[in-house]
Amino acid sequence: MAGVRIDALSAGYAGRVVLHGISARLPSASITAIAGPNGSGKSTLLGAVAGVVPPGSGSVVLPGGTRPAFVVQRSAVSDRLPITVRETVAMGRWAHSGPWRRLSEEDHVIVADALARLGIADLARRRLGSLSGGQRQRALVAQGLAQRADVLLLDEPTTGLDGPAREAITDALAGEAARGAAVVHVTHDLAEADRADHCLLLGKGRLLAEGPPAGVLTADALDTAWGLRR
């Protein structure tokens, strides 16, 4: 299974360019961390790979032309949605069955597996809006897992969570990488980025370094990213 190829990508919003000529590879069967300070373009890059931010120039090539699974931050989901945890996770199967078709037996098995892997099977009948932040984030990650996609994208999936929630999500992402998926997550946490298999470091919308975290998250590179060196 090939990974994601990004070639000379520039992208932004409302005529403002955020990313400048990014070329990188996001390998399959691996966890890639996208690190960098606020405003460096991390979430824009993730959105471009997800297909929700159109490129101004350059390209993003997904393995086999597949559709990635994109897990948003829990704050992006309204508390007022009248939907249960199980229904939230089951929406991950829509990419395969369509929103108006009944789920198959295989779909139900996949949904149950995703709930179990995130430790929220006992919350399946609860309304999503009634959950704590960590529980809701686990439900959104479970929805991503239920898609069984070749590429799994997550925007700061563990930020602000307690230890059990972070551990459950970390274990789930490792499991997806072991399955062969290209798992890509944005993070502000350099310790978390250091635990990834592959790392991209951004600064002011440009790729400063790429590769194994030990060779990317160096003192010089971090000083440059955070504007301490020019």
Image: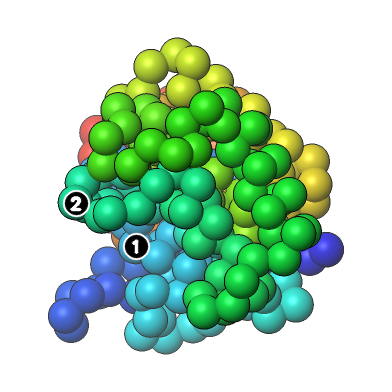
Q: Could you tell whether 95 is left or right of 113 in the image? A: left
Residue type, mark 2 in image = Arg
* Quadrant of the frame with the C terminus: top left
Residue 99, compared with residue 149, is above or below; it is below
Give the Cα separation between the discs numbered 1 and 2.
27 Å
Q: Could you tell whether 217 is left or right of 105 in the image? A: left
Q: Residue at x 27, y 67 (%)?
A: 18
Q: Quadrant of residue 37?
A: top left
Q: Nearer the viewer, residue 117 or 151?
A: 117
The number of numbered discs placed on residues in the rendered structure image is 2
- Mark positioned earlier in the residue sequence (1 or 2): 1
Location of mark 1 (residue): 44
**Residue 105 horizontal/vertical position (percent):** 76, 59
Determine the secondary structure under disc 2: loop
Q: Residue at x 38, y 81 (%)?
A: 54
Location of mark 2 (residue): 80
Q: Residue at x 26, y 41 (%)?
A: 129
Whether residue 170 is visible here, answered yes or no, is no
Residue 155, compared with residue 195, is above or below; it is below
Q: Nearer the viewer, mark 1 or mark 2?
A: 2
**Residues at circles 1 and 2 in contact by the CB criterion of under 8 Å:** no
Whether residue 2 is visible here, answered yes or no, is yes
Q: Residue at x 72, y 65 (%)?
A: 104
**Residue 53 horizontal/vertical position (percent):** 36, 74
Residue type, mark 1 in image = Thr
Q: Nearer the viewer, residue 146 or 226?
A: 146
